[in-house]
């Protein structure tokens, strides 16, 4: 078919609120009950076939009730990884030869299925497997994933329409080829939407993919893979390998056809992948595209002109929603003494003490548990360090209990030293440090906060004085890839606040934007001359 079709205009998926008595709440609760009652196999999907990997078994549990096993997966071996790579390569010619409209239709259908009949399944799987409350699951595994799928189709269509100019007698064209080879998507535990987007974005523009989700996110990843299949994704386009990763990377990163890595996770792991690619550089057919969104130490800086109610809400939501396990979570705040001593310290301590973390299937809870024993140990070590340091003082929380689930109490502490390690290290938990400063030192505090941590992911400024907002916005220009004025530093929406940071926070390729999609394309420029010249001599030669 030769027609060029326009694609549906994307709009952000409306967020459901699951209020008591609502039909949507009943339906989600029913699905939670069904999924919790099962114990399922969580296989790999290679070339369209589901089979268990050959390595050691891994139990996928509910973090808030860690004795409850939701499913069992297995570590992929070198041979499993090799099979996935082969399947991705074999499917590549079929997939890239399919028209963009056919590929787009698969992901648009996945978005519509997720918006409708699959919504409860992905939300319930995310709640149970990653310990998200209903609203945190809804904004992630339903709305953000739907938005990624729909907006990417629209962005890709715009990119394909971008063509060079042509002079008289010539027709110049861009052939937006997918990369030559396959893409390795490695995804984190904390967002089902990111896990779904990292393999599907390169696939949309014609690449085939080996996808390795985090084992702790494997429950929702399993259903995401089933959703893509239900939407008509052909076998071999996205090949899901299970397990921890090092054995898989050994094979994938050594393959000559590795064309790109689409990673989200910790800075350390991304640097390790990058290093290995560097060591292997003479093995590859091309230069693999390395796209990685990594850690953060996200700040909130308040000026004495800040609206205190807005600041209070932003700190509570920004630091403690989803147990602080968002790369964007506020984990260091700078508050002027006039505001802090003027009532905010007591108010924050009281609010933080009141936050209920527990079983996320009890909709009255504000949060759940942290993801696993490793995270729990990291947080308890950080709390012990903070408690034993004379420059720090705990105002709320500071305790943890893993007898039932991996529960870390929302913790608020003050620290007199703004260069303290608690202001530079990402803990990825519900732990917020506050540095209280004399109001007159605002400019010095901003300058110090700008680069004390190696990261540059998200950050907020709270002020009502416009001169202050303008000055701080300029001073902090490179301190955050997503900068917020009078708002919390979390909750970016696809199409509205393209997301990503620089410095140690990543390559800043802005997931869910055209900037990300171009990384998965390798354009060929075609010049066609209609009436070619037939004399090699130039006029000046006489
Ligand atoms: N910047 C962003 O957009 C963004 C978004 C979400 C999470 N994050 C970051 O992710 C981190 C939390 O997620 P996490 O705990 O899942 O991160 P992680 O780095 O521990 O794991 C990420 C993925 O890498 C895998 N992995 C680990 N070693 C590997 C190896 N050698 N080869 C292949 N895969 C390997 C893991 O199994 C997982 O799939 C935090 O640092 C957070 O800031 C960043
Ligand atoms: N995009 C999400 C963060 C994703 C990282 O964990 C936000 O903006 O809060």
Image (cartoon, helix red, strand yellow):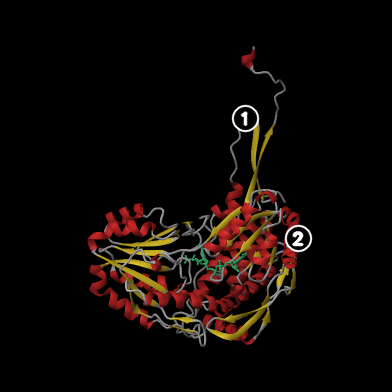
Note whether residue 372 is visible: no
Q: Secondary structure at mark 2?
A: helix
Residue at the (64%, 45%) spot, across then down: 523
Q: Where residue 303 appears, x then y in whole percent?
A: 28, 62
Which residue occupies the foreground of this view, 208 or 456? 456
Which residue occupies the foreground of this view, 234 or 90? 90
Vertical comparison of 235 with 277: above or below: below
Q: Where residue 477 appears, x then y in whole percent?
A: 39, 53
Quick one: label 1, few (<14), some, or many (20+) residues within 10 Å?
few
Residue topped by disc 1: 168
CB at disc 1 and ligand 1 closer than 8 Å: no
Q: How many marks?
A: 2
Q: Which dot, 1 or 2, sits closer to the camera?
A: 2
Query: Residue 105 occupies which quadrant of the picture?
Result: bottom right
Which residue occupies the foreground of this view, 256 or 387? 387
Note whether residue 216 is visible: yes
Residue topped by disc 2: 86
Name the quadrant where ligand 1 sits.
bottom right
User: Residue reaching furthest top?
Assistant: 542
3D distance between C-alphas at marks 1 and 2: 46 Å
Quick one: label 2, few (<14), some, or many (20+) residues within 10 Å?
some
Question: Looking at the figure, which quarter contains the C terminus?
Answer: top right
Q: Where residue 61 appears, x then y in whole percent?
A: 59, 81
Left or right: 162 in relation to 502: right
CB at disc 2 and ligand 1 closer than 8 Å: no
Residue at the (45%, 76%) spot, across then down: 381
Which label sits on residue 315? none
Of the numbered discs 1 and 2, the one sitting upstream in the chain is 2
Residue at the (64%, 63%) spot, across then down: 107
Q: Where residue 137 appears, x then y in whole percent?
A: 52, 75
């Amino acid at each position: 078919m030769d027609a060029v079709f326009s694609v549906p205009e994307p709009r952000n998926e409306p967020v459901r609120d699951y209020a008591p008595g609502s039909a949507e709440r009943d339906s989600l609760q029913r699905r939670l009950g069904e999924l919790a009652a099962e114990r399922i196999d969580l296989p790999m999907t290679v070339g369209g076939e589901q089979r268990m990997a050959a390595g050691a078994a891994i139990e996928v549990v509910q973090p808030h009730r860690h004795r409850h096993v939701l499913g069992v997966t297995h570590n992929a071996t070198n041979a499993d990884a090799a099979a996935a790579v082969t399947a991705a390569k074999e499917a590549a010619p079929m997939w890239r030869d399919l028209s963009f409209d056919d590929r787009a239709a698969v992901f648009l259908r996945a978005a519509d299925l997720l918006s409708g009949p699959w919504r409860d399944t992905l939300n319930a799987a995310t709640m149970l497997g990653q310990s998200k409350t209903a609203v945190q699951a809804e904004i992630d595994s339903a709305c953000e994933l739907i938005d990624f799928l729909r907006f990417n189709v629209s962005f890709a269509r715009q990119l394909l329409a971008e063509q060079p100019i042509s002079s008289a007698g010539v027709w110049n064209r861009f052939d937006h080829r997918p990369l030559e080879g396959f893409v390795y998507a490695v995804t984190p535990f904390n967002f089902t939407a990111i896990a779904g987007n990292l393999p599907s974005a390169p696939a949309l523009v014609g690449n085939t993919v080996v996808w390795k989700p985090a084992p702790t996110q494997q429950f929702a990843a399993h259903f995401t893979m089933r959703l893509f299949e239900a939407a008509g994704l052909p076998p071999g386009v996205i090949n899901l390998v299970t397990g921890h990763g090092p054995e898989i990377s050994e094979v994938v990163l050594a393959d000559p056809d590795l064309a790109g890595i689409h990673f989200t996770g910790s800075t350390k792991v991304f640097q390790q992948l990058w290093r290995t690619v560097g060591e292997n550089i003479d093995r590859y057919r091309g230069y693999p595209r390395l796209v990685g969104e990594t850690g953060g130490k996200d700040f909130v800086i308040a000026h004495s002109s800040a609206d205190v109610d807005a600041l209070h809400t932003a700190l509570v939501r920004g630091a403690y929603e989803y147990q602080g396990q968002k790369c964007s979570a506020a984990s260091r705040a700078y508050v002027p003494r006039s505001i802090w001593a003027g009532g905010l310290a007591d108010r924050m301590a009281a609010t933080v003490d009141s936050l209920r973390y527990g079983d996320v299937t009890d909709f009255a809870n504000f949060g759940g548990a942290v993801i696993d024993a490793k995270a729990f140990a990291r947080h308890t070590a950080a709390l012990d360090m903070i408690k034993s340091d004379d420059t720090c003082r705990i105002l709320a929380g500071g305790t943890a209990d893993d007898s039932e689930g991996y529960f870390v109490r929302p913790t608020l502490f003050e620290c007199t030293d703004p260069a303290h390690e608690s202001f530079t290290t990402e803990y990825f938990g519900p732990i917020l440090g506050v540095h209280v400063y004399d109001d007159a030192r605002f400019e010095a505090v901003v300058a110090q906060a700008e680069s004390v941590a190696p990261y540059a992911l998200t950050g907020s400024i709270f002020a009502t004085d416009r001169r202050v907002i303008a000055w701080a916005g300029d001073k902090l220009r490179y301190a955050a890839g997503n900068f917020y004025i009078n708002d919390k530093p979390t909750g970016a929406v696809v199409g509205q606040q393209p997301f990503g940071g620089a410095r140690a926070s990543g390559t800043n390729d802005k997931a869910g934007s055209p900037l990300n999609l171009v990384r998965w394309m390798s354009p060929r420029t075609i010049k066609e001359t209609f009436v070619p010249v037939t004399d090699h001599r130039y006029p000046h030669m006489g």
